[in-house]
Image (tube, rainbow, N blue to C red):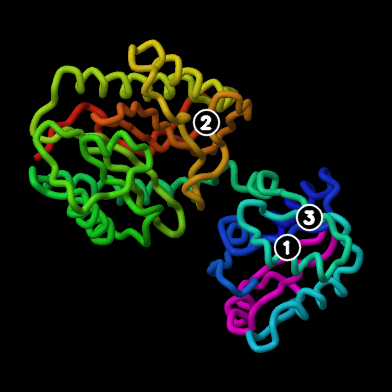
Amino acid sequence: MKNKISRLQEIMQAQNIDAVAMVPGANFYHVTRGSFGLMERPTIIIIPVDGAPVGIIPVLEMPAFSALKTGATTFEWQDNDGFQHAFNAAAKHLGSIRRLGVEGQRMRVFEAQAFKQAFGSIEIVNMQAPISSLRLCKTPEEISLLQKAVDISEAALEDTIAAVKVGMTERDIATMLVNRMSDHGSHGLSFDPIVAAADNAAEPHAHVRSDYNIMEGDALLIDFGAVFNRYCADITRTFFVGDVSDEHRSFYEAVRGANEAGHTVTKAGATAHDVDDAVQLFLENSGYGEYVLTKTGHGLGLDVHEDPYIMRGNHMVLEPGMVFTNEPGLYKPGDLGVRIEDDVVVTTDGYQCLTSFTKELRIVG
């Protein structure tokens, strides 16, 4: 923990930030190993650019927070008394804080207002990306946990598609998939699975239907991921039910080729732009370019979506240990969607693919 705090303090110094405040989530966990819910009760750790951390902690969370051995000075509060007095006490303890860095994607308005009331003329700065940069390059231990999450996911997928039959609903398949992940040791879900057939698969973030019975010839897109020790898998495979037309086969092979094109350029020293550009150029030249709706991928770890974002215009240089998804897709409204998603670790001379589930076109049911 001390090393992580030291690195965060170096980032603060470089950005002229006096302190950083984090709420429960991936960054909070990464720095403290504390797992708390983001709820109506503010639970906050403040790390000043110099000195020991400060905690603003609900009374009922104090035993769990104390067990973390953060060395933080804590200001606790009870529901009946409200939390503002704890913010005020933390402000008095910390002294002059002019610029406070926060996670712009997680800090809520009421928490920011409590900081402003406590500190007066404080400037609140969105430090989401700099704070999260602590998690960009995964350790071998983290990669091992990601691999376990992927292995659980792939075993569950194999079990599930072996049982798919014409006439099942998307909800039937999604329920079976969740149960199989639990059977194989999942600690949770990266997100609610997407199981989308036929025209519903043309929606990149489709909602699972309970009133559509899959039919022969349908595309069946399954996007899901298990969690293991908080680390998230994110996998997509697209199948065809019973049979596949020549046109749908061609559509599928275009996506598979784009996925491979992205892998080809993935290595340390390349950029996120380079990977997405290779994928998009392949799709644009496939004859199906009009059906591209999304970027190639996103980082993966304690959050299912994090840096690096694999898209044109993002010139972040890839480094060994970065993990991201390679998930090109084509989406033809009213007909089908195809997405193929791998989870990839950047290495010095290339990449390691955590996913091993076949990408050959597969007919099920």
For the view shown, which residue lies furthest in the front direction? 334
Where is residue 227 shown, x and y percent of the image? 39, 55
Query: Foreground mark, 2 or 3?
Result: 3
Which residue is label 2 attached to?
310
Query: Foreground mark, 1 or 2?
Result: 1
Q: Along the horizontal axis of the image, is 81 left or right of 353?
A: right
Q: Earlier in the sequence, mark 1 or mark 3?
A: 1
| Type of amino acid under label 1 | Ala
Point out the image quarter for the N terminus: bottom right
Task: Specify whether residue 69 is painted magenta.
Answer: yes
Point out the image quarter for the C terminus: top left
Kindly identify the residue that appears in the image at 40 percent across and 19 percent down. 261
| Type of amino acid under label 2 | Ile
- The Cα–Cα distance between marks 1 and 3, rounded to whole angstroms, is 8 Å
Quarter of the rendering containing residue 246? top left
What is the secondary structure assignment of the residue under circle 1?
helix
What is the secondary structure assignment of the residue under circle 2?
strand
| Type of amino acid under label 3 | Ile
What is the secondary structure assignment of the residue under circle 3?
strand
- The circle on residue 14 is none
Which residue is label 1 attached to?
112
- The Cα–Cα distance between marks 1 and 2, rounded to whole angstroms, is 31 Å
Magenta part of the chain: 43-72
For the view shown, which residue lies furthest in the bottom direction? 80
Vertical side of 176 occupied by 312: above or below: above
Q: Earlier in the sequence, mark 2 or mark 3?
A: 3
Labels 1 & 3 near each other (Cβ < 8 A): yes
- The circle on residue 124 is 3
Q: Nearer the viewer, residue 149 or 172?
A: 172
